[in-house]
Image: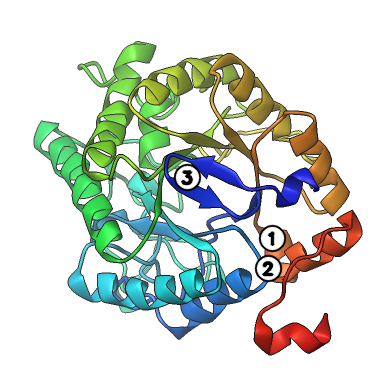
Amino acid sequence: MPKLFSPLTLRSLTLKNRIVVSPMCEYSAEDGVPNDWHLVHLGSRAVGGCGLVISEATAVEADGRISPADTGIYTDEQVAAWKRINDFIEQEGSVPGIQLAHAGRKASMSSPWIGRGQATPDEGGWNTVWAPSAIRFHDSYPLPIALDQPGIDRIIEAFRVGARRSLEAGFKVAEIHGAHGYLIHQFLSPLSNLRTDDYGGSRDNRMRFPLAIVAAVREVWPDDLPVFIRISATDWVEGGWSIDESVEFCKRVKALGVDLFDVSSGGLSMDQKIAVGPAYQVPFAERIRSEAEIPTGAVGLITEPHQAEQILKSGQADLIFLARELLRDPYWPRRAAKELGFELKAPKQYGRAW
């Protein structure tokens, strides 16, 4: 059996294969509520044969959305809409996962096809965005308000409540979004966190808020279900968050009950200089897997089945997270199965095509 199609068990949950739909924002929700687009988008990847289907970055509070068109998990209406989608994903033999998120200083932006600036009031934008320090991501982004202790406590509680609502919605994996320059990453990086209190300065202090969020989610998430966290292993900027710090962070998060690290990079600074190439982020996943002794997911320009198989067989990662490749081909797992000589059962409605 190809490693790509071997099952993986995390706590009581078994994924049928190692192919994961990486969270991808669709900018298609209204008031945070997913709709038919999300049903078809995520459902088709389940029909395509992915073992785990993770929703897009889903905000734990309204001010935490990247754009007015982002999904949320902070109202009963959102929970009901997600439940419908998750029921279909499970019906097709895949596992539904959610990425719990807060955009921090990168909130209230226009959808990408509208523009790259701050969302206007006509687009549903808002002026109050939050961050560890009052530093803009870029001139076109809103000026954030530095969080005080009540604000920090509010957001930690929002993650806790969001995780509880996610269970009601039928999600089986909770992934915490700690990457790509959003709020958790903003606290970790010395480039965006200039605080002088208990949440800034030293590496330990910069980890305090992220670790509190992980603890809050794990507190309400069932012991028999896994929690993931997505991290940016490096800022790709001198003096920024580094892979060495990521390894230490992963060790501490592991102790709180996280089961797998989804290892990405970048997104915090416009000054980043990324050495992009096929599987360019995989070495980060490999190092964290080895030194923190915990399962990892590899992501980033992984496009070919034999490439994905080699990453797994060589012990660089335990899961393959696919993003744009699955936008191009929702049935990528079926093509991969054919190329790797594995028989992947098709839905009965599609059986005559295979």
Q: Position of residue 303 (x, y in %)?
A: 80, 53
Real-space Cα separation, disc 1 to disc 2, in angstroms: 5 Å
In what element is the residue under mark 2? helix
Q: Which disc, if any, is residue 324?
A: 1
Quadrant housing the C terminus: bottom right
Q: Name the amino acid type tagged 3.
A: His
Q: Name the amino acid type tagged 2.
A: Leu
Q: Residue at the far left: name it.
A: 150
State yes or no: discs 1 and 2 in contact (Cβ < 8 Å). yes
Q: Position of residue 25 (x, y in %)?
A: 51, 63
State yes or no: discs 3 and 2 in contact (Cβ < 8 Å). no
Q: Residue at x 44, y 25 (%)?
A: 189
User: Is 149 left, or right, of 201 in this rendering?
Assistant: left
Front residue of 347 and 291: 347
Q: Residue at x 64, y 37 (%)?
A: 318
User: Is 296 left, or right, of 302 in this rendering?
Assistant: left
Real-space Cα separation, disc 1 to disc 3, in angstroms: 25 Å
Q: Earlier in the sequence, mark 3 or mark 2?
A: 3
Q: Which residue is mark 3?
A: 138
Q: Name the amino acid type tagged 1.
A: Arg
Dot 2: within a 10 Å radius of its alpha carbon, few (fewer than 14), some, or many (20 or more) residues?
some
Real-space Cα separation, disc 3 to disc 2, in angstroms: 28 Å
User: Is 256 left, or right, of 42 in this rendering?
Assistant: left
Q: Which residue is mark 2?
A: 327
In what element is the residue under mark 1? helix
| Residue 301 visible in image | no
